[in-house]
Amino acid sequence: MAKFKKKKSKPTPEPEDTNKEVIDNDTSDIPEIEKSESTPEPSKESKISDEQKNDNDKKLNKLFWLRVALGVISGAASTFLFESIEGEERRWASIGFLIIVFIGTIIVAKGMKMQLPSSDRKKIVTQGIGSFIFLFLFTWIVTYTLVHTATVSSGINI
């Protein structure tokens, strides 16, 4: 922030005083803006080349679509994998399966060796997480409903 010295000048003349006296504009009393003592040097993160950014974008795109595909596949698989479990335990087993598959995608993402700046490190975890969870739940509910509609007396008969 710039620091200024107090300006010591005569009070502003009244409008009727303008004809009597000419004001001398002395700009020598106005201080210059202080320059900052140190300028921040560009960090190593900003020196990432365009090729590396494009490569990282492609890898993040692959990670997103991997999570979308695994969300659909694991949602359908959880219907059949946990068929023998009854009641509340089936739900918790499916949610546990969801978490395990997601942790697996994090491990795969770390294996892609993306060189992201430290500000973007969380993208490995957050990239496509919403799509993964909602597609898992949607597919899980739809496949469970289609598989078990024949056992319900009313509803859609397939």
Image (spheres, rainbow, N blue to C red):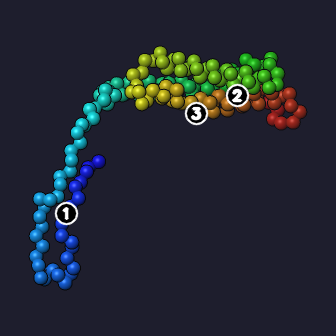
Q: Which mark is residue 130?
A: 3
Foreground tag (1 vs 3): 1
The type of residue carrying mark 3 is Gly
Gap in Å between the C-alphas at discs 1 and 3?
62 Å
Mark 1 element type: loop
Residue situated in front as seen by the camera: 146 or 96: 96
Measured as percent of width and height from the top left, residue 85 is found at: 80, 19
The type of residue carrying mark 2 is Trp
Which residue in the rendered view is the most extreme toward the top? 111
Foreground tag (1 vs 2): 1
Mark 2 element type: helix
- The count of marks equals 3
The type of residue carrying mark 1 is Lys
Foreground tag (3 vs 2): 3
Gap in Å between the C-alphas at discs 1 and 2?
77 Å
Residue at 82% x, 32% y is 157
Gap in Å between the C-alphas at discs 3 and 2?
15 Å
* Residue 94 visible somewhere in the drawing: yes
Measured as percent of width and height from the top left, residue 98 is found at: 65, 23
Measured as percent of width and height from the top left, residue 54 is found at: 37, 28
Q: Quadrant of residue 112?
A: top left
User: How dense is the environment of label 1, judged by Cα within 10 Å: few (below 14), some, or many (20 and up)?
Assistant: few
Residue at 12% x, 73% y is 23
Q: Which residue is mark 1?
A: 8
